[in-house]
Image (spheres, rainbow, N blue to C red):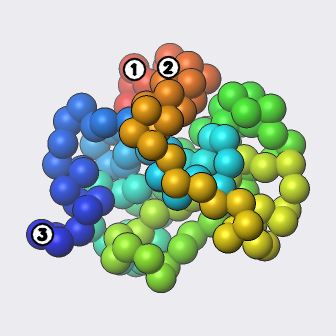
Amino acid sequence: MPDCPFCEMAARRPLPHAVYEDASFMVIPDRQSLGPGHCMIIPRRHVTKVYELGKSRYTALFRLAQELAPCLERATGAKAVSYTVFSSGLPHADLHLVPHDDIRVLLRPLEYVRELSESELEANAAHLRAFVPTRLLSSGR
C-alpha cells in the first residue's frame, strides 16, 4: 500500500530498530512507548485489521507473541506482558506487546505514553534483541 508507513518499512531490509524480523513479520519498539520493552509485531503483508489476517498468519502472529512475551519480561523485569490491538491509528494491523507492572498502563495509556527519540529506539531495540533466543533469530522462527 503506497501511503502506509508500515508497508514502506516492510520493504526495507535490514529494518532499522528491528528486534526481530522474518518473511512474515517485523517486531519493532513502538515510538509512542507505554514503557520499557513496548513493541509491535507488524505483518509485512498489508492488512488493515488483525482479524483480517488469514488463519495461518493469524496463528503465526500469536505464536510469535507467545515466544516473545517471556523475552520481554526478562528484558524489562516486568510482571506481565499484555497484548493490545489498536485499530484506530495507522491503517495497518499490528499487535502491541506491552510489558508492565501495573494495569493502569493499559487503562490510562495517555498518562504513560512517551515519544522515543531515534537514539532511544536504537538502544531499546538492541537491548531487547539481546533477550531474543538465538534459535529464534537464526531460524526466522
Proximity of marks 1 and 2: CB atoms separated by less than 8 Å: yes
The span from disc 3 to disc 2 (Cα, nearest Å) is 34 Å
Q: Is residue 101 left or right of residue 91?
A: right
Judge left or right: residue 116 versus residue 22: right
Q: Position of residue 22 (x, y in %)?
A: 33, 38
Q: CA distance from mark 3 to mark 1?
A: 31 Å
Regarding residue 69, the answer to whether it shows in the image is yes
Q: Which of disc 1 and disc 3 is earlier in sequence?
A: 3
Kindly report which numbered mark, 3 or 2, lies closer to the viewer in this rendering. Answer: 3
Q: Does residue 136 appear in the picture of this structure?
A: no
The residue type indicated by label 2 comes to Arg
Horizontal side, residue 100 vs residue 68: left or right: right
Q: Position of residue 61 (x, y in %)?
A: 49, 55
Which residue does the numbered mark 1 point to in the structure image? 138
Q: Secondary structure at mark 2?
A: helix
Amino acid type indicated by mark 1: Ser
Point out residue 1 in the picture as x, y percentages from the top left corner.
Answer: 16, 70
Q: What amino acid is found at the position of numbered circle 3 in the picture?
A: Pro
Q: Secondary structure at mark 3?
A: loop
**Residue carrying label 3:** 2
Residue, x 52% and y 54% (percent of image)?
115
Between circles 3 and 1, the one closer to the viewer is 3
Badge 3 vs badge 1, beta-carbon distance below 8 Å: no
Mark 2, residue position: 135
